[in-house]
Image (tube, rainbow, N blue to C red):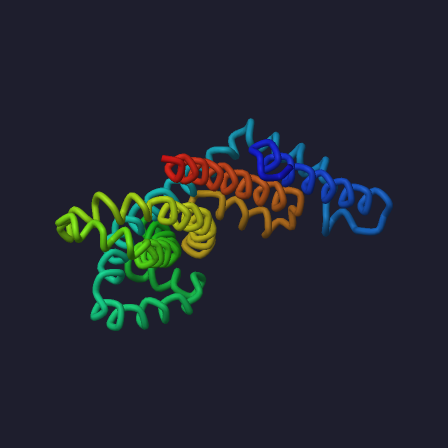
Amino acid sequence: MFQSTRGRVLAPVLLGVVVVALWEAAVRLGAVNPFFLPQPLAILQRVVHDVTGPNLSYAWPTLTAATIGSLVALVVALPLGVLIAHSSTARVTLEPSIAASQALPAVAVAPLLVVWLGYGLPPVIVLCALMVFFPILVATTHALTHIDPDLVGAARLDGASHWSMLTAIKLPLALPAILTGVRNGFTISITGAIVGEIVTGGRGLGLLLSARAASADTVGIFSTLVLLCLVAVVVYATIGAAARRLAQH
C-alpha cells in the first residue's frame, strides 16, 4: 500500500491527523495547559495570519540565506568529494579534519562569524554552508566509492579515460545519491539560517522567532515552527522527486 505515490503521501498525512487529534483532545480536556501547548486550531489560525499577512516577508531572508549557503556548500563539497573518492592521500589527509569540524556546534561558531564578517546576511550564509557541506561531501564520497567495480573495469577495458569515466559513468550513477545528500543538507541549512539569524540578529524567521519567544507568545512560536517545517517539507519533497526521476533514467 505505502509503496505507491499515494501511499507515500497518505501515510504521513494520517500520522499527522492522529497526532493533531490527540493534541487537540488533550488541550480541550484540560490535560495540558494551553499556554505551554496551544490548541492546534489556534496555531492554524496564526499560521494563516502569518502566511497571508506581512509576517510572510520574514521567510525570504531565511530562504535566501539557506539557498545561497547550500549552493556554496555544493560547489565546494562536490569536487572535494570527487577528490577524496579518487585519492587515498586526500582521504587520509582531509577526512580527520573534516570529521572533527562537525563536532563544533553551530551556535558556538556563529559568534565568531559575526566577529569575522559582521552582522547581516554573510555570516548566516556561511553558517548554512558549513552545516550543508558535510552531508553533501559524505554522500558524494560514498556514492563514488560504491559504484559497481565490474562496470568500472569494463569501461577501462573499452579505453575510457579517467575524465570520461568520471563524467560519463561515475557521476551519472552517483547523482541520485548526491541529490539525497543535497536534499538532506538543504533541510539542515534552514536550521542553520535560523540559528544564524537568532545569534547575529538577522531579519528572517529567526528574528520573528526570537521576538515571539521574548514576549512569551507560544502560539506565535508554534506558528513560526510550522512555517519552518512546511518550507523544509516542500524543499525535501521537491529535491526527492528530482532524485527519483533521475534514478529512473
Q: Residue furthest top?
A: 52
Report x, y in % for residue 69: 34, 48
Report x, y in % for residue 142: 35, 58
Q: Quadrant of the C terminus?
A: top left
Q: Considering depth in this image, is 136 or 20 the residue closer to the camera? A: 136
Which quadrant of the view contains residue 9?
A: top right
Q: Is residue 94 above or below residue 135?
A: below
Q: Is residue 52 left or right of residue 242?
A: right
Residue 105 in sight in this render: yes
Point 74% across, 41% down: residue:
18
Q: Considering depth in this image, is 249 or 19 the residue closer to the camera? A: 249
Q: Considering depth in this image, is 221 or 2 the residue closer to the camera? A: 2
Q: Is residue 69 left or right of residue 55?
A: left
Report x, y in % for residue 27: 80, 45
Report x, y in % for residue 98: 32, 67
Point 39% across, 56% down: residue:
135
Q: Is residue 9 above or below residue 31?
A: above
Q: Is residue 136 left or right of residue 7?
A: left
Point 16% across, 48% down: residue:
158
